[in-house]
Amino acid sequence: MDETIDECVYQTTDKWYDIEHVENVLANILSRVPVKSLLVCKSVCKRWRRLISSQAFIDVQLLWSQKNSVYIVYPYMDMMMKLYLVNNSGEITKSINFPYCDNLSLLTVVCSFDGLLCCINYPWKVDSGMVVEDVTDVEIRICNPVTKKALLLPRGSPSKEKPSIGVAVGPKINEYKIFRFFNAKRISLAKHQSRVNRRQCEVYSSSTGSWSVIGRVPYYPMHSSHSPLGSNHVFVNGKIYWFIASNEDPLIPGSILMADIEETFETINLPKEVTEHSYLVNLEGHLSLVAVYDEDEIVNIWILKDKNEPKWELKCSDHIPFSNDECVEFAVARENEIFFITSNHHYIYDPEHGFWQELDLSSISEKKFPVAFAYTESLLSCGGRMDPRIEYISDKRSI
């Protein structure tokens, strides 16, 4: 009996040894393991550590993880970032705590891509002997909430007003660009220059690790009333889109500014008059416009079809399941559905079937400039490559 058991153990071990040494098979198995467990698996042996740390495995793990994306919700803007993962059933599956950072002002998240988050906050400055927030600048961090790593980007050019940013991803995995719009304090020797003439754009590239000034831009992205730091933007098929404020009301979009990965700018007209509660989202791989009309208690969802030339198509117009005194504070799309955060509720809307699902997120009791994004766990480096500048987020209260 003992000999039979020993033989079975030997055969099983021997088979596993064969599998382990076929790295494609092993990589395929490990790529399905949660990232938190993969970090533990690194300590199993040198072979596993080398495999899991390789860029090829990181790419494979990301591709597998993207098939199981969820929502990441940041309901309360604070110095301590508490994030919630919400699955396809609308249930909270995990909460992630970023360490308290007593040297930072309030943090917000402006986008999520490939398991990374772009977070911004006002830096501190001394004014009249007092330490206050410098609202003419923002600190930008790229964070991986699962690996607990973060990268503080270099400071951009000095600005006379609050900058706006947008994040573009690609063309390769682990590459990104950050567009930063700023109002230059000085561009020439001219004594008198209008604020419009001083507006410029610069781009941070993960490939170079530095900023490059593009120059003057014709339009400046509008700031969202729902986020004191960020501007509503979305990245779709190699292009970033921002709202441009209307001439009549700075809180209502008047058109759309577009920039591609090659740093070329264009403007796009809106399909019709929209409201303050309007959002740009990536719905089914298309730029889409979500506009909530409070008085009529309806939502219109438009999709931009751009096979030959940009053309808006009304995908649906539906009644909202909440009263007009309840404000829509954020909206984001994931695949073919839209996640709405209102003053008192959370909903997932299926525009194809006109179905609203109210979520029971009782763990989220307070909201302060809430945001949500489609999210997938990954092992990606915050710097876009294996970068020694990346810092571990620890309990030492610093990033």
Image (tube, rainbow, N blue to C red):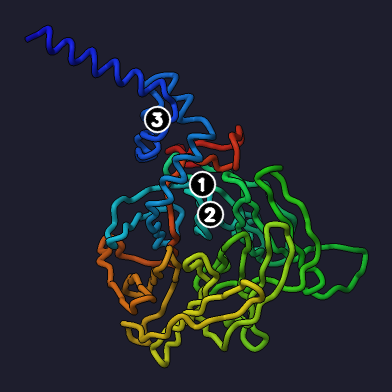
Furthest-top residue in view? 3
Dot 2 or dot 1, earlier in sequence: 2
Q: Nearer the viewer, residue 227 or 26?
A: 26
Percent position (x, y) of residue 39? 40, 32
Percent position (x, y) of residue 220? 69, 71
Tag 2: Cα neighbours inside 10 Å, few (<14), some, or many (≥20)? many
Between disc 3 and disc 1, the foreground one is: 3
Percent position (x, y) of residue 332? 45, 67
Tag 3: Cα neighbours inside 10 Å, few (<14), some, or many (≥20)? few
User: Could you tell me if the residues under marks 3 and 2 are in contact, i.e. CB atoms within 8 Å?
Assistant: no
Between disc 3 and disc 2, the foreground one is: 3
Residue 163 has which mark?
none
Label 1 sits on what residue type?
Answer: Cys
Dot 3 or dot 1, earlier in sequence: 3
Label 3 sits on what residue type?
Answer: Val
Question: Which residue matches tag 1?
Answer: 143
The answer to whether 381 is drawn above or below residue 134 in the figure is above
63 on left or right of 233: left
187 on left or right of 104: right
